[in-house]
Image (cartoon, grey):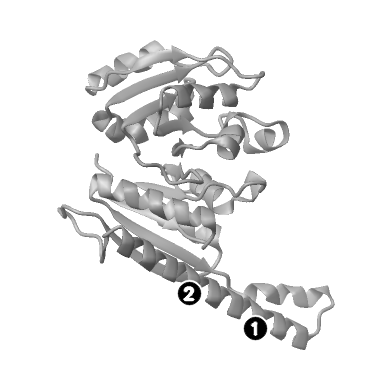
Amino acid sequence: MAIRKLLLPLTGTAAGEAALSTALTIARRWNAHVTALHVRVDSRDVAPLAGEGLSGAMIEEMMSATEKESSDRASAVRTMFERFVTSQNVTVGEARFGLDHATASFAAVTGREEDIVAQQARLADVTVVPHPDAGEDVSSSDALHAVLFDSGRPVMVSPQVSPKSIGTRVCLAWNGTAESASSVLAALPWMQRADAVRILSAEGYQRRGPGAPDLAAYLALHGVHADILNFKSVRGSVGAGLLAAATEFECDLLSMGAYSHSRLRQLILGGVTRHVLEYSNLPVMMNR
């Protein structure tokens, strides 16, 4: 299965610019279409504040300010989109089958970002999201988690600096779970085109399920030769060890399952998914 459609939620941040560049890099590799989506805040969402002791005039003023801020941000995001596609010679137009070049389009809608993005992601081959901003708690990345938990499709976390290549050297983080099995399926088209593939496994990472040798044998049936590395934790962190092993391989795409443990447990105690979200500096494709 080829990559034909990418969804890109855009917010206008510096991380959003890197994600746009990342999405366009992928689109050129696959001759795919990028749908850049900006979700505007609905000014009516401030209306419930009327029950907090605010007068009608105050609520109306807040709604007006919210509408202006939302409009200004949408305009800035569209300007950023147009500048990027022009600089990278990407054709603006509708998605069509059989084109020999990348295309892109922009849409702005009003509503709750996490709901709209999750719904639109269900008909995208992959959704590219910005890396969580430096110093920002990853639990606030609503769009990212909405795609992971409510779309049934893979999500690509863009690094903060757009990479020069994506998918030439692929790493699979394997621990035998259903989540990691989903990540294998999502990464299969990439692996079949890659120059090199490596399975990353670790004793402290493996759960009940097939081991890395079983995965290597399965991939061979699909024409993918993958070697296996049993990596070590770094300073007691499996996530840090995973990223170190991917970096040593000069990986430009890491595919992994997300939240094999519950999200709440990882937010409180930490975990591999949380560590990778916070510290990765390469494209990471995650699946649930």
Point 64% across, 72% down: residue:
45
Q: Residue furthest right?
A: 53
- Badge 1 amino acid: Ser
Point 25% across, 65% down: residue:
94
Graded by Cα atoms within 10 Å as few (under 14), some (14 to 19) or many (20 or more), the crowding at tag 2 reads some
Position of 214 with respect to 207 (left or right) is left
- Percent of width and height locating residue 196: 30, 24
Point 59% across, 29% down: residue:
272
- Percent of width and height locating residue 14: 53, 56
Position of 262 with respect to 126 (left or right) is right
Q: In terms of sequence position, does the residue under pointer 1 or pointer 2 come before the other?
A: 1
Q: Is residue 102 above or below residue 48?
A: above
- Percent of width and height locating residue 150: 50, 48
Residue 269: image quadrant is top right
Q: Is residue 122 visible?
A: no
For the N terminus, the image quarter is top left
- The foreground one among 110 and 78 is 78
Point 39% across, 61% down: residue:
36
Q: Which residue is mark 2?
A: 75
- Badge 2 amino acid: Ser
Q: Which residue is mark 1?
A: 64
Q: Secondary structure at mark 1?
A: helix
Q: Please identify, in this view, whether the residue under mark 1 or under mark 2 is nearer the observer.
A: 2
Q: Is residue 169 above or below residue 115?
A: above
Position of 153 with respect to 90 (left or right) is right
Graded by Cα atoms within 10 Å as few (under 14), some (14 to 19) or many (20 or more), the crowding at tag 1 reads some
